[in-house]
Image: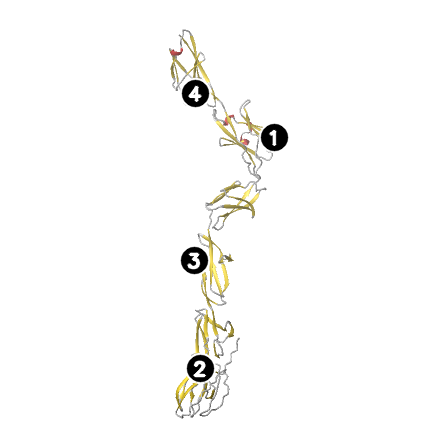
Amino acid sequence: MKKLFVALSAVFVAVCFLGCNKIPTTDISYDVSGQIFSSGGVLAGVKVFVNGKEVCLTADDGSFSLSDVKHGSSLSFEKEGYVFPTSVVTSAGRDLAVFGIKLFVPKVTVLGAKGGTTTLEEGTVPNSYRLTATPAEDYVFTKWLLDGEFFSSDPSFEITLTADAEFTACFEKIVFDVAIETEYPSAVSGAGEYRKGETARLTSSDTADAEFAGWFKGDELLSSEHELLLEITSDVTLNARFLKRLTFESFSISGTVLSWSAPTAERIDVFVNGNFALSTTENSVDLSDVLETSGTYVIKAVAFADGYGRAEKEISFVFKLPVSAPYNLGADFEGGVFLSFQRINSATDYIIFVDGRMILLSEHPELAEFSNDCVRFRIDDFLTVGKRTEIYVVAAGGKDRADSKPSDSIFVVLVGELNPPQVNLNGTVVSWTKLEGHSYFLTVNGVAIPLDGESTVDLAPYLAESGRYEVVLTVSAENYKSAATTVYITK
């Protein structure tokens, strides 16, 4: 803090003149030129002079002129930046040399224009002032600074200056604004005015469309909890961020296949009994490779997408470890149609699927033959003649084990036999009844006769010479043995 000391006094000395001027001898008036001296000035040779004497005085500051000063007159002096006491000519032949006091007016500013106001009052003596700081509503005065350094903690004080000075009144806000920026204003609370040091309780809640992500100050995450307690020391603006909800429209498990519908999800993480199992972008996943033993499992799927919150679905199910699937599935046709496949020792039965029809082997033991490592099962009665039939086998697990995966499929055709076509012969005209899905082939003495889909043909053009001709009509169909009818024409 700067210490300011000023001695406020008006110094009166005997009359003096600029240069070495002779005082006129008249008692009526004087023409005087002299010096103004500051309170720190030096006046040499000060003494009382009488009429007719010559004096030489020096000073360090300012100047003034007086004309036609009357004996006994009251004199006043003016100079910008100074203040002077009134001087009086006391008697003939005497005047006064006057010392002026230089004025210092303090510069007063406010730190924070809205914090408050200041007043400056002049004292009873030159360079004496009273400064007062008054805080605005919601603010409190803290201190005065003098030329940038601490001066006083009193809001009002008096001072006498001896030099230029700049005072700054400092105020501090005691009521602060807490603002919350968010896309979901109805889901947050706690914004408003708080006094300094007060704790603001800010709360958030999830909505039907979004879930709360966290309280942010700029890019800084303050908390991801729904409630935030914040000690208030200044105005503050927080951002309550939310993430749009992801939803599972469906979620189910069938066997070991977990499936779902989550249209906005970009990734699904699957957890088995709390342990991460796999990540996928598909809408289903087979868990057979991660389910190692029979038992009860809790399966949880967590959906993720950029700009969205996570969504979770959970399902519990009892898993039975499946028996091994039979392999080496084949068929032979010796003495009938026999299906053969690997024998699974842990299987309690076998389910044979014939074009989707389920046949339990245990219900037809008379059709089965067993060896150490193979099962043969006659399937003639379950096939449709002429039809290409898909067949696969599942090993049944029974009470303690799940059924196996289906074996590889085979396709079996039980070939049928066609009836020979009925041929009508009228002279050289051959005709027959055409059946849908059948193909016909006509020859005369082994030479093919072109057919354009007709079922009546005049063979006269093909019988060039007299003689006996062999006419053969052959019918065929897919998955059937062909059949033929032979007739003879004599020309």
> Residue 373 shows which numbered tag?
1
Visible in this render: residue 132? yes
For badge 1, the amino acid type reads Asp
Nearer-N-terminus badge (1/4): 1
Residue highlighted by disc 2: 63
Give the distance between the C-alpha atoms of the residues marked 1 and 3, in whole angstroms: 72 Å
For badge 2, the amino acid type reads Ser
State the residue in front, 148 or 372: 148
For badge 4, the amino acid type reads Ser
> Residue 185 shows which numbered tag?
3
For badge 3, the amino acid type reads Pro
> Residue 439 shows which numbered tag?
4
Q: Tell me the quarter of the picture where residue 325 sits.
A: top right
Secondary structure under tag 3 reads helix
Give the distance between the C-alpha atoms of the residues marked 2 and 4, in whole angstroms: 143 Å
Camera-near label (3 vs 4) is 3
Visible in this render: residue 273? no
